[in-house]
């Protein structure tokens, strides 16, 4: 697995990119924030005093707010507390946007994967020439490319991605939700499956549960492989300075909706989101929901549990995106282009906040950070954890 290559090979280049500077005598923390309206369009006229930032539960003063736009015709708009926003030419080249397309092959059908690849190619074609983009298909790592401005080479690697999803083969026609419930010894589920599948003594209660436990183990293994592959990628991105956008393309990451029991991978999923936040990674999860297709093509008739299974598949992605301060877009029966359009819209502009620090901040330990804005209808995308390293001594 070469997930680390996506980040490390560009480290030297990224260190040469311009970093935000703030005219103040107080040492500041730079915080990247996306603020969008309900349609995903950046709100670019906020002033510093319209933001609120808490670090480790304590309110911090915001010395400055700089809006950086990537839309044609718009320029960087710096504002400080009390200033009226004005449009000016940028004093230095703006930081390059960085995108990594992460595709969970084990969660996608062949058709879903093909639709995702085609939409991803169109997404890449719409990026600006200096945008960096990479791709990583996990958990196999068979298709990957380091972040680069050579967009054509990334498009070629995308063609290697395929869907590897298949439901666990079982003789009892157990749905994913039934596998989880029966493995967790849900008596109602066991009774329902027994009556449906075991007429004439074809099987027993014990056999139903044993089959469910075996299948739950297989599902857990696949989930762990996906989580592990994604976590390795996210950790490698920590080596690259600046804000990164991770476009996570998945058919869903199933975790149980029960308290405890089998398929409870909430802690592992939360850890990925936390790692993404600490790596300053903005997560856009594109959920290509296959549950309805699975339900209507079931060999024994319409599966009525698909609503619940779709929600369980979405919950894992929501946990990752939520802990990283990102968002999930669910695609159901339509082209994934609508989700990629949302990514392009939301990342077409962001703020760099200069937040005043205190001595306790710079201990190298992860701290919770919360960013809010004082404007109705605004949605904030910001990391939820930050590690502030001690200042270098001269």
Image: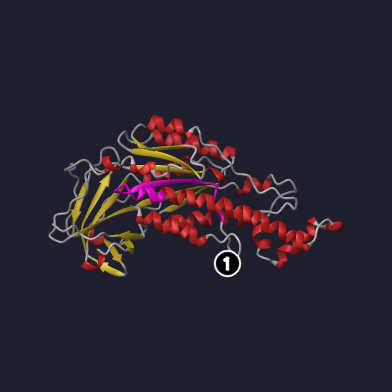
Q: Residues within 10 Å of mark 1 (few under 14, many from 20)?
A: few
Residue occupying the point 48% across, 48% down: 229
Please state which of residues 70 and 229 is positioned toward the viewer in this rendering: 229
- Assess whether residue 245 is covered by the magenta stretch: yes
Relative to 389, residue 154 above or below: above
Residue occupying the point 43% across, 32% down: 155
Residue 381 visible? The answer is no
Segment tinted magenta in the rendering: 234-254
- Residue 385: x %, y % from top left: 35, 60
- Residue 114: x %, y % from top left: 54, 36
Q: Which residue is situated farthest in the right direction here? A: 200
Please state which of residues 232 and 169 is positioned toward the viewer in this rendering: 232
**How many marks can you see?**
1
Scheme of colours in the image: secondary structure
Q: Quadrant of residue 183?
A: bottom right
Relative to 272, residue 90 above or below: above
- Residue 386: x %, y % from top left: 32, 59
């Amino acid at each position: 697995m070469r997930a680390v290559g996506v980040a490390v090979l560009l480290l030297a280049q990224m260190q040469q990119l311009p970093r935000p500077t703030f005219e103040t005598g107080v040492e500041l923390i730079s915080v990247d924030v996306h603020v969008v309206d309900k349609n995903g369009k950046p709100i670019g006229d906020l002033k510093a005093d319209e933001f609120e930032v808490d670090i480790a539960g304590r309110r911090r003063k915001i010395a400055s707010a700089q809006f950086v736009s990537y839309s044609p015709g718009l320029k960087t708009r710096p504002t400080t507390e009390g200033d009226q926003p004005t449009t000016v030419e940028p004093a230095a080249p703006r930081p390059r946007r960085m995108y990594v397309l992460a595709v969970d092959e084990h969660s996608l059908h062949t058709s879903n994967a093909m639709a995702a690849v085609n939409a991803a190619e169109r997404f890449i074609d719409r990026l600006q020439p200096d945008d960096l983009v990479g791709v990583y298909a996990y958990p196999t790592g068979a298709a990957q490319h380091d972040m680069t401005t050579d967009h054509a080479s990334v498009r070629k690697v995308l063609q290697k991605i395929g869907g590897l999803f298949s439901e666990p083969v079982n003789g009892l026609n157990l749905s994913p939700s039934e596998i989880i419930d029966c493995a967790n010894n849900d008596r109602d589920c066991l009774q329902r499956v027994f009556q449906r599948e075991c007429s004439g003594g074809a099987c027993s209660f014990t056999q139903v549960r044993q089959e469910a436990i075996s299948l739950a183990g297989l599902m857990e293994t696949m989930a762990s492989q996906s989580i592990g592959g994604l976590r390795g990628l996210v950790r490698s991105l920590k080596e690259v300075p600046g804000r990164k956008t991770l476009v996570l393309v998945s058919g869903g990451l199933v975790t149980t909706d029960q308290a405890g029991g089998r398929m409870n991978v909430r802690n592992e999923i939360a850890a990925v989101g936390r790692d993404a936040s600490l790596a300053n990674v903005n997560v856009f999860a594109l959920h290509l929901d296959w549950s309805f297709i699975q339900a209507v093509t079931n060999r024994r008739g319409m599966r009525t549990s698909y609503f619940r299974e779709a929600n369980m598949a979405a919950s894992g992605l929501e946990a990752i995106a939520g802990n990283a301060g990102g968002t999930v877009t669910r695609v159901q029966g339509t082209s994934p282009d609508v989700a990629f359009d949302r990514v392009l819209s939301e990342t077409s502009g962001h703020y760099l906040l200069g937040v005043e620090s205190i001595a306790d901040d710079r201990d190298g330990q992860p701290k919770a950070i919360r960013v809010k804005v004082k404007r109705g209808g605004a949605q904030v995308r910001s990391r939820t954890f930050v590690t502030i390293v001690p200042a270098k001594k001269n």
